[in-house]
Image (spheres, grey):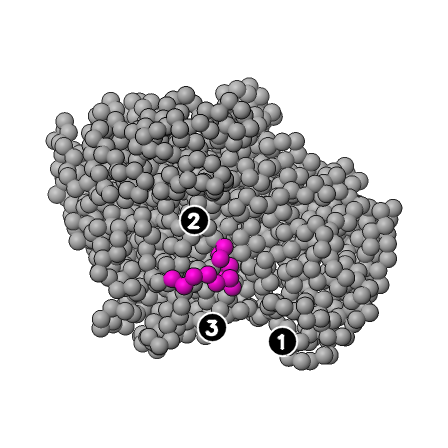
Amino acid sequence: MLVACAGIILVGMAMVAPPQRVDDAADAMIAERAHDILVSRCLRCHGGVREQAGLNLAWRDRALQTRAKGPPAIIPGNAAASALLTRVMHTDPELRMPAEAPALSADEVATLRAWIDAGAVYPVLWSLRPIAEQMPAPGPESMWNTDGIDRAVSLRLASAGIPLPAEAAPESLVRRAALDITGLPPDAALVSAYVADPSPAQWERTVDALLASPAFGERWARVWLDLARYADTKGYEKDARRDVWRFRDWLIDAWNSDMPYDQFTERLIAGDLLPGATENDRIATTFHRLTLTNDEGGTDNEEFRVAAVMDRSVTTWLAWMGTSMQCVQCHAHPYDTIDHRDYYTSLAYFNQTADTDREDDSPLLHVAWERGTTTVPVMQELPANEQRATNVFTRGNWRALGDAVAPGTPACFPPQGTQHADRLGLAQWIMDPANPRAARVEANRIWETIFGRGLVETLEDFGEAGARPSDVVLLDVVASRLQKLGWSRKALIGEIIKSRTYRMSAQPSDAALRIDPENRMMSRAPRFRLEAEAIRDQSLAVAGILDRTMHGPPVFPHQPDGTWMVVYSGDGWTTSEGGDRYRRAVYTFWRRSSPHPSLMNFDAVSRETCTVRRIRTNTPLAALAAMNDPTFVEAAAAFAQRAIDATPGASDAERARWMLSAALVRTPRHEECARLAQLVAGERAAATTATQPTSELSVWSAAAATIMNLDEFLSRT
Amino acid sequence: MSHHHPRPRMVATPAEYMAELQAMTRRQFLGNSAWGIGGIALAAMMGSEKSAHAKAVSLPPAGSPIDPLMVRAPHFAARAKRVIFIHLAGAPSQHELFDWKPALVRHNGQPCPDELLKGEHFAFIKGHPTLLGTPYKFARYGRSGQELSELIPHLASVADDLCIVKSCTTEQFNHAPAQLLLHTGDPRFGGASMGSWLTYGLGSEASELPGFVVLVSGDKTPDAGKSVWGSGFLPGAFQGVQCRASGDPVLYVQNPEGVDRAARRRMLDALQDLNSMAAASAADPETDARIAQYELAFRMQASVPDAMDIAHEDAATLEAYGATPGKASFANNCLLARRLSERGVRFVQLFDWGWDAHGTNATDDIHTQLPKKCKESDRPVAALINDLRQRGLLDETLIVWGGEFGRTPMAEFRDGKKDFFGRDHHPHCFTVLLAGGGCNAGTTYGETDELGCRVVRDPVPVKDLQATILHLLGLDHRRLAYRHAGLERHLTGVTPDARVHSGLIA
C-alpha cells in the first residue's frame, strides 16, 4: 500500500492494523527519523542476521508479530504498550536496549514514541521511490539555469550562502575534460582552439570531439571491467590463461558506439537469449563467464559451478542494483527487507547454463579475427529437458538442499511484469522504467567516475545501511536525464561535462571551505589523484611514446622479474616487444593471482570479484612506482628527448617552461621554470664530478621525472 | 614522539575512516609541540641546507598527514604487539609431526572404518581407503613434556615455548579456499587478510617500513595468489607488501640505473618545491599529503634495503638460523621476520611452499619430501623463537605456525598406486603452533579421536583462532569492523559466533 504525501512515500502493511493514512509531512519526517534509529541502533542484533530474541525489526510485519518470548515489539498506535519503547526506556541496565551500547537519547525515544503512536508506518527506502521528474526551479543566476544539474547545484549553494564558483581557466578545463572523457591528456590543438575561443559553443565542440574519440571507450570500459571482474586468467590455484579479450573489446566498442544502457544490460546478462542473437550478442555474455574456474586437482566441479552461479547473481545485483546479495546466501539481509529465500530465487535465473567449471571452459564460441580464430567462453542455456532444479541452501551450504524455488526477485523491489522467468526477463525487469534503482545506480556511477565521489558515496549499497545521497534532487535530475536520453550514457556524460557545474574552478572560496569543507555541495571542482590506468597512460602520452593501437590480445609491458610465481604453473611473463610495451593500460595482461604491481600500487583491484568502487590511497609504494617503474623511467627519458627536440637552442628556463606547459596544460609561473632550471643546473654540476659522463638527455630526464611526479600532474584538477 | 591513541572505530565507511585519520593528524599536529621538533629533524635528515625546507617543518616526522598506518590504541590491554604468521602452504601433516596416535600405527594398512567415511568427501581419495600410521617416532620434550616427532628436533628443544593446538578445524578442503578462509575469514575472494585487519585496527610502529610484510619461500606464491595478503574491501594501504630476497626487496624501491641517492634527493627537493608552489596557489591539503608520501618513499628506499640485508648479522646468528645472505630461503625469511619485527612491523607473514604431501611421487610424500621440508624449516623456526627471546621480544611477538587444513589418517594412493605414501586433504582437524605473544606456552590444547580423524575436545574453528589472535593483540573481534556493501564485516565473519579460547592464553 503506497501512500504519497509531501514528497515522501510510506508503506503500511494491512495485516495487523489498517494502513495509516499519513497526511502530514511532519509524520513522514518522524517516520524517516524513527526508521533511521532502527537501522543504526537496533538492526545489528534485531535484523536479518541475528534476530535476537526472535525479533526482526527490518520488516514491519515481523516487528508487529506476537512473539514466543513476549509481546509484539511494536503495537501501532500504542507506544506505551509496545515492547520496543519499554525496553529502550528500561531502568534496569540488564534489560535496557540497545544491549551493551549507549542508551537512546531522550529525543530518540520521543521520536520512536511519536512514530509508533502515529501508526509505526515504515518509510519506503529513498532509492526505491519514483525518480522525481520535474526540473528544479530556476536560481538567481541565468548562467546556472540552462539545465537541471546547474539549477540543483546553484540553488543548494545559494541557500547555503556559498557564492557560485568562478569558471576554471580554459586550458585547465580542457585537460580536465580530456582526462575524464578519454583518460588521456588533450591534444595541443584542442587546447589552443578553446583557449582562443572560450565560448559555450566552442566548449560544446570540444566536449563532442572528446566524446567522439575512440579513447573514450577505452577509458570508460575500465569501469565495467572492474564490475565484470575481467581478467585474462581463470583464478584459483592454477590461474591459467583464458582468452577473453574479445569481451574487453566488445565493452570498448559498446561505449564508443554508445549502445543504450538497456540494450547493453540485456546483452551482458542475456545476449544469448535475444531473438536472433548475433555473434556480438553472444560475446557480450562472456561478462558472466568471467567468474573463476577452479582447475585445482581434487576440486568438486559442482561446488565451483555453484560458486560461479552465485557470483553471477551477486554481481548482477551489485553492479546494476547497488544491492549486496552476498550476505543473503546464509541468512536474511541484516538491514534490507531481502529474505534468505530471495537469494535462491535470484540465483535460479542463472542456474540453467551449460558451463560446469570444466578446465576447457566450455561452452565456447569460436570467433574469427584478423589473425585467425579465438574462442571465448559464453553463456549458453541448457535445453528444456536438462534444466536444473534450484534449491535453497540451508545456511548457505550447497550440499544442504532446502525447498526448491522458481526464479524471482525480492518483494521490496518493483513487482515482476510480463517478463519471462529467465536471464533475459531479469535484464528487462532491471531496465523497466518502473524500477528507479537501475537508473539511479548507473547515473551515480557516471557521476562518481567524473567527479571522484558518487552523489551516493556507497556505490555498492543503495539500501538501508548505505549512505544517503548528498543531494537527492541532483541525483534524480541525473537519473531521470539518463532515462530521458534513451539510456544514452554518452549523451549524459556530455550533458554533465557541458554544464556550468562541471566547469567550475577547483579553487575553493573562503565560504566554501567554511560551510562545505567536505565539498558535498559541489562548491568547487573536486581535485583527486587519477586512477591507475590514467597515470600510466598520461605519462606515456606526454612522453610521446603511447601506442594508440586498439583491441586485440593482451600485452605485456615492463614488469619486475619474479613477480609471477604461481603454484603448479610454469607460465611466465615475457615482456612485449615494440609498441605493445607502450599500449594503454586497459590492454595490459591481467593475472588474477598477480595483477600488474604498478597498477596495483595505484589502487587497481585484483578482479577476482565484482568491484564497484576503488578506494584511493596514497602510499609510499605508489610514489616508488611512479619514480622507479621502468615504464615511467622510459617515459621520463622520452619526454626529455621530446623537449630537447622541440626547443633547440632554448635556455634552460625556456625548455623548462615548454615541458611544464606540455605536461600540466597551463601557463607555468616564472618561479616554477626557474626552479626546474635550477635542478637542471644542479644535475650538470653533479655530472662534472661524476666518473661517468652525463648527457643532456639524462640531465633533462631528471627534470621530466620531476614534472611527472608532481601532485598536479598525477591529479585531476 | 608521543601519539594520541584514539580507539579504532567500530564500524567505519572508507570516507569516515579517512576523515578520522585526518582529524587525528590535525589533533596531533595542533596538540603536540614536539611535532615541530620532529619536523626540524626531518629537514635535517633530508640533508637539505636550503631555507625553503623550513616549510617542511610543518610535516609530520613519520607518515603523511593522512597516514593510514598511524599507531592506534587497541580496545584493551594487548598481550602481543605484533604477529609473525608462518604459513606452511599445502598443509603439513599433523600425524607425522604432532598428533601421535598409537592406534593408527597399530591399524596401519587396514581398511578405514566405515563410520569415518560416512558423508565424507575427499579431494583425491577414491574407493575405500586404508589407514596410514606414521613411520616416525614421538617423544616428550621439555619441562612441559610436550609430545613431538623426531622430524622436528629443534622445535622439540623449544617445546616449553610452544602452545600446541591440536584441535583446529576448517570448512574447506581445497587449498585456495582454505587459505583464503584462514587468512581472510572468507573462503571466497574479496575479504581482507588478517594483516590488513591488524594494520587497519592498530596502525604500525614501523614508520619507514610497510606495516604488513610478506615473505615467500619455496619459489611459489600461495594457491590463492596474492589475495591471501590482500586488503580486500579495506583500503589498499593495508595490503601486505611482498619483500623479496632477490631483485628489489620491495618492488620499485631501487632507483633506476644512473640515479644515485644524491640525485634522487635533488629531484625530490625540486619536486617538493614545485609542489609547495602549487599548494600555495591551490590551497589543497592533499598536496601536503603528496609531499609527505614522497618523503616517506625516499626514506623507505634506505630503510627497506637495510632491514632486508642480513649480511651484517653475526656468524652465530646466521648459523643458528641456517641463513645464507643473498639466498632466497625459508631460513633467511625467519631471520628477516625477526629484523622486521624488531623494527616495529605489525604483521609479518611467511609463506613456505612444498607441504602438500599426497604421496604421488618422491617429491610429495611423507618419507622423502616431508623430512626435507622439516629439515629446511625446523631449525629456523626454533632459532627465531630463541632469538626473539634473547632480544626481549618474544613476550610481545606472537608467532603462529600452521597450514590451511590437516591431512587424512588414511593413505591416499592416488590412482591405486602404492609406491609412495602420503595423505589427502583433511578439514576436520589440524595442528597449529603458537609461541610468544602471551600465548599459553608449554601446553597442548584440544584433542582428537584415537585415529586422529576428528576433534573430541576443545575444537578451534579457524574463526576462533582468528578471534583469539586478535584478542592477544588487544582487539575485540566484534568491534574490529568495517562496513562494506551493506554488511558489517569482521575478520571472523558476519555472524557473531566466533569465540576467544582462554585456554590458549597465558
Image coordinates of residue B25 in percent, x first then y, are 50, 28
Amino acid type at mark 3? Arg
Q: Is B496 part of what is drawn in magenta?
A: no
Neighbour tally class for label 3: few under 14, some 14-19, many 20 plus, Cα within 10 Å: some
Residue annotated with mark 1: B126
Label 2 residue SS: loop
Q: Are marks 2 and 1 on the same chain?
A: no
**Residue toward you, A296 or A334:** A334
C-beta proximity under 8 Å, tags 3 and 1:
no
Quadrant of the snapshot with the N terminus of chain A: top left
For residue A410, side relative to residue B15 (left or right): left
Q: Residue at x 20, y 30 (%)?
A: A23
**Residue toward you, A270 or A591:** A270
Image coordinates of residue A517 in percent, x first then y, are 35, 27
Residue annotated with mark 2: A332
Amino acid type at mark 1? Lys
Task: Tell me the distance, in whole angstroms, between the alpha carbons under discs 2 and 1.
Answer: 38 Å
B391 to A414, vertically: above or below:
above
A13 to A261, vertically: above or below:
above
Q: Chain of mark 3?
A: A
Numbered circle sitting on residue B441: none
Label 1 residue SS: loop
Q: Is A399 part of what is drawn in magenta?
A: yes
